Amino acid sequence: MASVAAALKERGIAVSGSDQGIYPPMSNFLEERGIEARPFDEANLAHKPNLVVIGNAISRGNPEAEYVLEHNLAYCSLPELLRHRFLQGKRSLVVCGTHGKTTAASLLAWLLEHNGLNPSFLIGGIPNNLGQGARFTDSDWFVIEGDEYDTAFFDKRSKFVHYLPEAVVINNLEFDHADIFGSLAEIQTSFRRLINIVPRNGLLLANADDANLLPLLGIDHCPVRRFGLGDNSDDLASGLAFSESGSEFRLGNTTFRIPMIGELNVRNALAALLLARYTGLSDEQVQSGFDTFKGIQRRMEIRGETGGVTVIDDFAHHPTAIRETLKALDQRYPGRRVWAIFEPRSNTTRRNHFQAELAEALCLAKRVVVAEIARLEQVPEGERLDPARLMEDIRTAGTKADYLPTADEIVTHVTAQAEPGDILCVLSNGGFGNIHQKLLAALAERSTKEL
């Protein structure tokens, strides 16, 4: 929403918005562009705007949603806005999957931008190369992150069914979004709806290593190519190697290098590479783009280093994403102690669907700290994640773990015990009480006292 708001303002449209809580990097992003985000109040709509775009976090009872309906104002969802105002007539490249969407879409957009194709894009994060998450150009190509979350309170279909796909990549498929999906089968149905609208002159790229995705690939209405690290792949990545500076893999007779670590990022790069080939880029052009890619904010982003302790921010909140992030950090920083500082904040991790899986993932760190479950009162008691059991399971596996409710308590605890060489990885899909800056400030203060 923030990225589209900024892109619309660039087109000369007056834009304002409302939210119940906004935090960096998007709060900074909007402020820099002169877009005001206010608390919800029906008075914000008293000027009767030409169009109200209602985000999927809004439900009935929201004062502005009620005002829109009561006064019969023109409204739509964000995906509807995109489809009718921006995507029609474009060649839409839709990047999907439970994990890695933002990274793969950012990488693809940069490959096209770096090689002069000037793509439009909409990405759920801020790629450092591009400086913003959305841009609308005259190019035929449109790179868009395809989210399976629902569209709006008045349209419960997944967002990506609105995106007029020409080519689709599905990087993986797992159970997530427990607030709107009741089972893995329901998520598979949603992805099947997307696959059903890929045109016969388009392309479906699918991760052949994902068992949950394979049942969806028995189609003949469009070309299908399978990629991955296993033998079932049409496009097989092999020869993986990892170092502090990045990863390396082979595809056919060509070796590619990416400035990112971990198997998940190899798959992300492979997806972007294959879609880039689809647009006509050569492998040499792709590698040149890889060489200049600067990453995405909040994806294994180094926020600072003080007293030999490095603070990293990562958006991971699903057990698989947490596991892959911690594996990647171990590959990037071999021999160093990695802390996992986790906030159970997503609609799935606040629940007990992944009680055991979270423990297994977090155990990959040398030290674990878990914060209070966000908005606990919104989750029925029998469905809540059990922090005490989580601590017990992690400790039983041999990893030291602590449950500390607030960001300030965590900062005090970690600062007292962190040692030079430690990696503090903060895992959250929210602001987490500005814990990253608080950690850096506390570590700096400790270093000053030690001097």
Image (cartoon, helix red, strand yellow):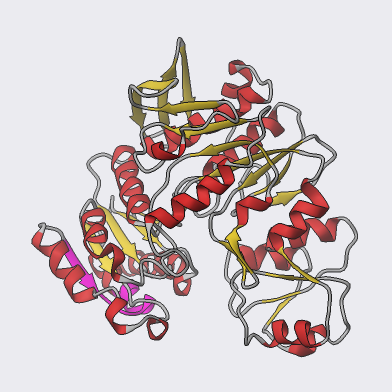
Number of marks present in the image shown = 0
Toward the viewer: 57 or 17? 57
Decide if residue 263 is on the left or right side of residue 299. Answer: left
Decide if residue 324 is on the left or right side of residue 133. Answer: left
Location of residue 43 by image quarter: bottom right
Location of residue 349 by image quarter: bottom left
Residue 152 seen in the figure: yes
Q: Is residue 176 above or below residue 65?
A: above
Q: Residue 159 location in percent, x, y?
A: 61, 56
Toward the viewer: 441 or 94? 94
Residue at horizontal 24%, vertical 62%?
368
Point out the stretch of residues depicted in magenta: 400-412
Residue at horizontal 45%, vertical 48%?
99
Residue at horizontal 36%, vertical 48%?
325
Q: Residue 68 location in percent, x, y?
A: 77, 82
Toward the viewer: 437 or 388? 388
Magenta span contains residue 405 = yes
Q: Residue 7 location in percent, x, y?
A: 78, 55
Q: Quadrant of the C terminus?
A: bottom left
Residue 262 seen in the figure: no
Q: Quadrant of the N terminus?
A: bottom right
Decide if residue 356 is on the left or right side of residue 133. Answer: left
Magenta span contains residue 424 = no
Q: Residue 388 location in percent, x, y?
A: 18, 76
